[in-house]
Amino acid sequence: KMSKTPMVAGTMQTDPRSGGVKRSSGVNVLPVVSETWAEVRDDANKDVDWILIGYDGNSKTDMTLVEKGNGGMEVVSSKLQPGVPLFGGVRLSKGRFVHFLYVDEDCPAMKKGRTLMYKNGVFNVLAGCDGEIEMKPGLTEETMGPVR
């Protein structure tokens, strides 16, 4: 016999009060990002094991491919620029994947705030990652901190 009491929203359900829809942060991740991420994820593709994603020109909402390449963490960490917020994903040597957001103290406060709001939206496109790492210039797999 079915109970007439309303079900309490548990961890597996979306609370109906929130409208049941994950609200978008307003970020628009361009298709080239997921296409390139598929290259990173492709075990047969040895040419691409990292991706850098950033704002498309002067757009405040569009995220596009900045650069892709191979050489892993050491190469991608050498590509970071002061004041330029970048998202990225890297294949680690053991075949696992991590993503990151790099925002340094030279990044303007408004842009930093907006970029942080977009984090989940961009990370959702980088499917299959074990988690987030703290990216900084010169980072290597050996000096990488814990995956969050």
Image (tube, rainbow, N blue to C red):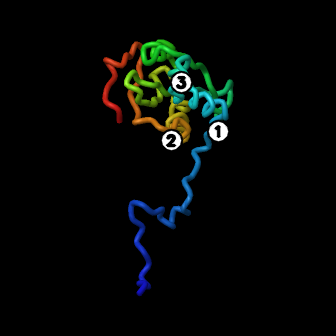
Q: Quadrant of the C terminus?
A: top left
Q: Position of residue 83 (x, y in %)?
A: 52, 20
Residue identifier under label 1: 28
Could you give the CA–CA distance between mark 2 and mark 3, rounded to whole angstroms?
Answer: 28 Å
- Amino acid type at mark 1: Asn
Circle 2 crowding by C-alpha within 10 Å: few under 14, some 14–19, many from 20: some
Report the side of 24 relative to 97 (left or right).
Answer: right
Q: Is residue 37 left or right of residue 100?
A: right
Which residue has dot 2 on it? Answer: 120
Nearer to the camera, 108 or 129: 129
> In the rendered structure, which disc, 1 or 2, sits on the residue that comes first in sequence?
1
Say whether marks 3 and 1 touch (CB < 8 Å).
Answer: no
Q: Is residue 108 visible?
A: no
What's the amino acid at mark 2? Answer: Asn
Q: 30 above or below 80? A: below
As helix, strand or loop, the secondary structure at mark 1 comes to strand
> How many marks on residues?
3
* Label 1 to label 2: alpha-carbon separation: 12 Å
Residue 110 visible, this angle: yes
Q: Which residue is mark 3?
A: 44
Q: Residues within 10 Å of mark 1 (few under 14, many from 20)?
A: some
Drawn side of residue 49 relative to residue 132, left or right? right
**Which is closer to the viewer, label 3 or label 1?**
3
Say the numbered circle drawn on residue 45.
none
At 43% across and 84% down in the image, what residue appears? 2
Disc 3 residue type (three-letter): Ala
Q: Give the spatial CA distance, label 3 vs label 1.
A: 29 Å
**How far across and down, in percent of the image, does residue 36 sit?**
60, 27
| Quadrant of residue 143 within the rendered picture | top left
Q: What residue is at 68 percent from the left and 30 percent from the top?
A: 59
